[in-house]
Image (cartoon, rainbow, N blue to C red):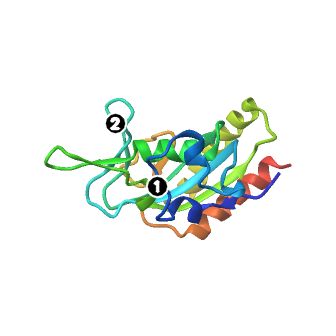
Amino acid sequence: MSKPKDLTEAYTRPWVDWKLRGKAFASQFDREADVQRGLYVHLDMNDSHLPIYDANGAGKIIIFGSTMALKFGKFLKGLPARMLLNHDHFHRRNLDGSSDKGIFARVLKSLFVLDLSQSSDSDIRNYETTLRKMLLDELCSREWIHPAHRGRSESINLAHPIPKSEVITIFSSFADRIGR
């Protein structure tokens, strides 16, 4: 099993054109950042007092105002496509009714990816379930989960900012565990 890669820089560069789609969007990334299948964990910081919402349906809160969150999941059709989906979905709702869209790259503080391109879809889905449980258990044991967090399945609001080094340590431990 490979070790998680830190791909933060690739997805936070100011010249990434988030308006592109499909292969044109993916072509902006080198081979290392264009992983086809795997798991991701990213740490996001919302510096605004306004929460960040998901664009799905009524829009669940992804990150509380003035809070850090850990978001994780699987991707089966390329990491660029998955990160572009995050870009399209993350938004703030202003008090005047307008929305701030395209904020993903600004709130992204770290992105770690485990390349599972050689694994089956069902294995990746099972690994995602294991990752969810492990992250919740680990964050709970350290008392790092925000008291208002209500169990959103793919993002966890944190009680206080945590360093990127802690996230990679936890994710690397997970990678070692499933690599056995």
Q: Can you tell which quarter of the image residue 166 is in? A: bottom right
* Residue 140 in the image, given as x and y percentages of width and height: 53, 54
Q: Is residue 134 visible?
A: no
Relative to 42, residue 57 above or below: above
Residue projecting furthest to the front: 24
Q: Which residue is under mark 2?
A: 59
Q: Nearer the viewer, residue 64 or 83?
A: 83
The Cα–Cα distance between marks 2 and 1, rounded to whole angstroms, is: 21 Å
> Which one is nearer the viewer's eye here, 70 or 19?
19
**SS class, disc 2:** loop
Q: Could you say which is closer to the camera, residue 178 or residue 21?
A: 21
Which secondary structure, mark 1?
A: loop
Q: Residues within 10 Å of mark 2 (few under 14, many from 20)?
A: few
Q: Is residue 158 above or below residue 60?
A: below
Please tell me which residue is depicted at 51% across the width and 59% down the height of the picture. 43
Pointer 1: what residue? 145
Which residue is most to the left? Answer: 96
- Determine whether label 2 and label 1 are within 8 Å by CB: no
x, y percent for residue 145? 46, 55
The number of numbered discs placed on residues in the rendered structure image is: 2
> Which residue lies at the image location 41% right of the left edge and 61% below the top edge?
106
Q: Amino acid at mark 2?
A: Gly
Residue at image x 71%, y 55%? 31
Residue at coordinates 66% horizontally, 36% vertically from top-left?
A: 76
Nearest to N terminus: mark 2 or mark 1? 2
User: Is 40 positioned to the left or the right of 4 in the image?
Assistant: left
Vertical relation: 150 (above or below) 164: above
Q: Amino acid at mark 1?
A: Ile
